[in-house]
Every structure is written in structure tokens, then in C-alpha cells.
Amino acid sequence: MKDFKYTINGKSYKVKVTRIDQSSAELEVNGTPYEVQIDKPAKKQPTPATTPAPAPKTASGEPVISKPTVEGGTTAIKSPLPGVIVDIVVKVGDEVKKGQKVLILEAMKMENNINADRDGKIIEVKVNKGDSIMEGADLIIIG
């Protein structure tokens, strides 16, 4: 069915999934067969996408719900994915422009430039070089 290769504490494991259903799975780990009980049901196949209903509009034709624009205040640049901070290229007090690189995040063995999402002044840098961060974590606060 599917073959996987894992390394745990320096030891390599070849895992072959031969069967899987709602409550159990059969697999081979380095050639040794195992039957594994599954605590929760396996994920179901995604259902075909349906076309969403059109967004509601007011009598004048404007959308009922609109995304607010950020005019002032502070906003946080959030991590788009989990990774490790490789470099921080700004410091507190720096003025940045929208699209300017503020830090470099290594994720999935690739370096990703994280850019300012608006013009402003760096209020706070919430991470340090070498930090491991999760997706959605606040990285830098821009005011």
C-alpha cells in the first residue's frame, strides 16, 4: 500500500502499511508484521467540492461583511509555517515598508523570507535567532 522510512534516535525503520481500515492497520516494520489498533477512525476521503453560495449584499450592492483595513494600531507578523528562525534583519525602532524582508525562517529545509505586511515601525521582536516556532506564532509587532 504505502512505504515509509523513519529515523528515530539514529536508528532507521522501514515501515510498509499493507492494510488499513476504521479500527486497525497491518504494517511491517523492518520486515516484522504488526497489527495496530486505531483509537479514532481513519480520515474519510474528501467529498467533492461544491460551489459556495454567493456572499450576501446590501440593497446598494455592497458586501454585508467586508475585511477591515488596518489604518493604525499595531499588528503582528505571524509565522506562515513551523520552522527555525535563521536571521532577524530588523530591530526595535526600525522603520519598514510593506514587502520589506524582516526575518528569515527555515522550514522544510528551505529558507523563507518573511516580509512586513504593512508600512510601520518595529515595536517588538518576539523571537530570537535559532528559536523553533510554530505556525501562527507572533514574530514581529509593527506599529
Image (spheres, rainbow, N blue to C red):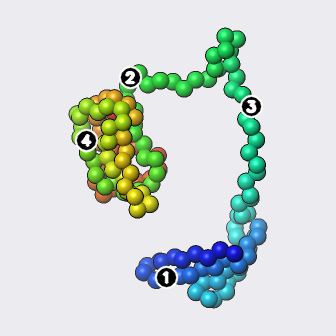
Q: Which residue is mark 2?
A: 72
Q: CA distance from mark 4 to mark 3?
A: 44 Å
> Is residue 6 something that shows in the picture?
yes
Is residue 117 found left or right of 23 in the rendered image?
A: left
Instruction: Examine the rendered structure and indicate whether residue 88 appears above or below residue 12.
Output: above
Q: CA distance from mark 1 to mark 2?
A: 53 Å
Query: Residue at point 26% right, 45% down?
Result: 89
On-image quarter of the N terminus: bottom right
Quarter residue 140 falls in: top left
Q: Which residue is mark 1?
A: 12
> Is residue 143 something that shows in the picture?
no
Mark toward the start of the polypeptide (1 vs 3):
1
- Within 10 Å of disc 1 (Cα), the crowding (few <14, some 14-19, many 20+) is few
Mark toward the start of the polypeptide (4 vs 2):
2
Q: Which residue is mark 3?
A: 53
Query: Residue at point 62% right, 89% down?
Result: 31
Label disc, if present, on residue 113 of the rendered structure: none
Is residue 45 found left or right of 74 in the rendered image?
A: right
